[in-house]
């Protein structure tokens, strides 16, 4: 089971995410949207959305760089494993708290606001709840990391992630003996990837980068219109 969960399941989750997202965009492009509920109720939305999205973007790129950058690169720069782990704890902790507060605000709004709840699907509420749970687990791993600041556990997680991404054999072996909390955090993260094509999370692949170089404002309605 350990070999399946951390050696095979990652490829199942990533394959479903990629193939499922492509199929959804090809077969049902009009469902590819955030399904924003701001027009239904602006209360709690702005604060919750800003905290959640800023926090989760920092977490995502922090994991991406922290896990997939070769260990030899950090060694070449003279960055010790202990320093990298402390940096991950501080930055990840701050971003995690931001994401958790924002996620709880959005989840509370989705569950208690009648208008928002009436237009929410099971997938809308469920994926948000899973993301909040994932952040809680991630924050929980900080307390484990504080008990071994030598960076040894972090290196094992990096080796596992790089073995998966670069198709190296025996990836699951790196997680033998790792705390169940880290394993649960990894498993839930993979499951979120697996579910991504079937939820509103697909909008992460459609970041509006063109807005950065868009010339000026776009007038939707003239002030003279009645």
Image (cartoon, helix red, strand yellow):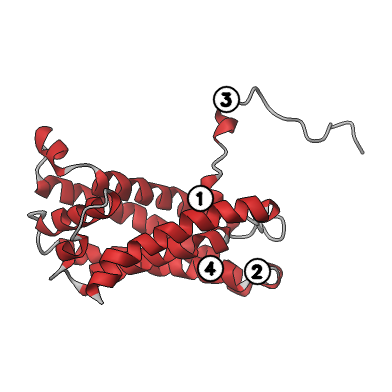
Residue 175, picture quadrant: bottom left
Earlier residue among tags 3 and 2: 2
Earlier residue among tags 1 and 2: 1
Residue 213, picture quadrant: top right
Give the residue at mark 2. 120
Give the residue at mark 4. 107
Name the spot of residue 168 as percent of width and height, x first. 22, 53
Residue at horizontal 48 percent and vertical 51 percent from the top: 53
Circle 4 sits in a helix, a strand or a loop, which is it? Answer: helix
Residue 223 in the figure: left or right of residue 158: right
Residue 146 in the figure: left or right of residue 52: left
Q: CA distance from mark 1 to mark 2?
A: 20 Å
Q: Are marks 3 and 4 in contact (CB under 8 Å)?
A: no
Name the spot of residue 150 as percent of width and height, x first. 7, 54
Earlier residue among tags 3 and 4: 4
Against 224, residue 72 (above or below) is: below
Give the residue at mark 3. 213
| Other-residue count near label 2 (Cα within 10 Å), few / some / many at <14 / 14–19 / ≥20 | some
Circle 3 sits in a helix, a strand or a loop, which is it? Answer: helix
Q: CA distance from mark 4 to mark 2?
A: 11 Å
Give the residue at mark 1. 50
């Amino acid at each position: 089971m350990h070999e399946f969960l951390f050696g095979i399941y990652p490829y199942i989750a990533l394959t479903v995410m990629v193939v499922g997202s492509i199929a959804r965009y090809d077969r049902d492009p009009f469902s590819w949207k955030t399904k924003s509920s701001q027009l239904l109720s602006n209360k709690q939305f702005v604060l919750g959305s800003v905290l959640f999205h800023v926090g989760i973007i920092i977490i995502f790129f922090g994991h991406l760089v922290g896990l997939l950058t070769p260990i030899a690169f950090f060694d070449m720069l003279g960055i010790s494993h202990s320093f990298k782990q402390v940096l991950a704890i501080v930055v990840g902790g701050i971003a995690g708290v931001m994401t958790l507060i924002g996620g709880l605000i959005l989840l509370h709004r989705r569950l208690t606001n009648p208008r928002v709840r009436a237009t929410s699907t099971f997938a809308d509420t469920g994926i948000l709840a899973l993301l909040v749970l994932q952040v809680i687990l991630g924050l929980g791993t900080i307390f484990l990391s504080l008990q071994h600041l030598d960076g040894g556990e972090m290196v094992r997680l990096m080796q596992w992630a790089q073995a998966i991404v670069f198709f190296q054999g025996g990836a699951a072996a790196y997680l033998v003996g790792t705390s169940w909390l880290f394993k649960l955090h990894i498993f839930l993260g993979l499951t979120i990837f697996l579910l991504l094509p079937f939820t509103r999370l697909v909008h992460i692949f459609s970041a509006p980068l063109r807005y950065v170089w868009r010339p000026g404002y776009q007038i939707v309605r003239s002030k003279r219109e009645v």
